[in-house]
Amino acid sequence: MDTCQLPTSCVMPVFKSPKDYQAFRISPQDTNRLAIVFDPTVANMSLTYCVEIFDQGGKTPANRHQLAVEMFFILKGEGRAICDGKVVSIQSGDSILVPPNGIHVIENTGEGRLYALCIMVPNEDFAELIRSGTPVTLDDEDLAVLRRSS
């Protein structure tokens, strides 16, 4: 019987809590904010993992990524996702996978805020774009959702 041996050394995982997340609004007129959880500077790999927070009626500008695959997982709220003209309603628990070059928009159509985990691989300068925006503070509602206590 072949047994697998665990390594005797381990690289410590990176731990962050919602109070550690840095949030930004990319452009002053944007109706969404992005809270960076992990990016290449922390993860030491080409990915960006953030929580995107859409105010009521908020949406992303239409955008696309040349190489990156982007995945959204809806934590709370409801809205719609549009990719290359195809429209789908989204709500808590739904996932969207946007392929490279897919022109896409995520829009909050609900009564409150829309919260989505967003993962982009490879990073394709997404984290740098987010960090080039205006820093914003996560409020009590944001922190309650991120702690899953709302």
Image: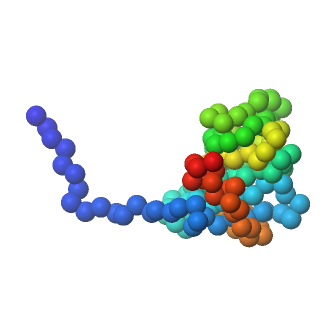
Near-viewer residue (101 or 82): 82
- Tell me: residue 133, above or below residue 113: below
Q: Quadrant of the N terminus?
A: top left
Near-viewer residue (13 or 46): 13
Q: Residue at x 57, y 53 (%)?
A: 147
Q: Is residue 5 left or right of residue 144?
A: left
Pinpoint residue 61: horizontal percent, then vertical percent.
84, 50
Q: Residue at x 21, y 60 (%)?
A: 8
Q: Residue at x 14, y 38 (%)?
A: 2
Pinpoint residue 74: horizontal percent, then vertical percent.
66, 40
Direction left: furthest residue: 1
Q: From where the camera sits, is residue 145 visible?
A: yes
Pinpoint residue 77: horizontal percent, then vertical percent.
72, 40
Which coloring applies here?
Answer: rainbow
The answer to which image quadrant residue 97 occupies is top right
Pinpoint residue 81: horizontal percent, then vertical percent.
77, 36
The answer to which image quadrant residue 75 occupies is top right
Q: From where the camera sits, is residue 123 visible?
A: no
> For the image shown, how many numbered marks are present on the structure?
0
Q: Residue at x 75, y 37 (%)?
A: 78
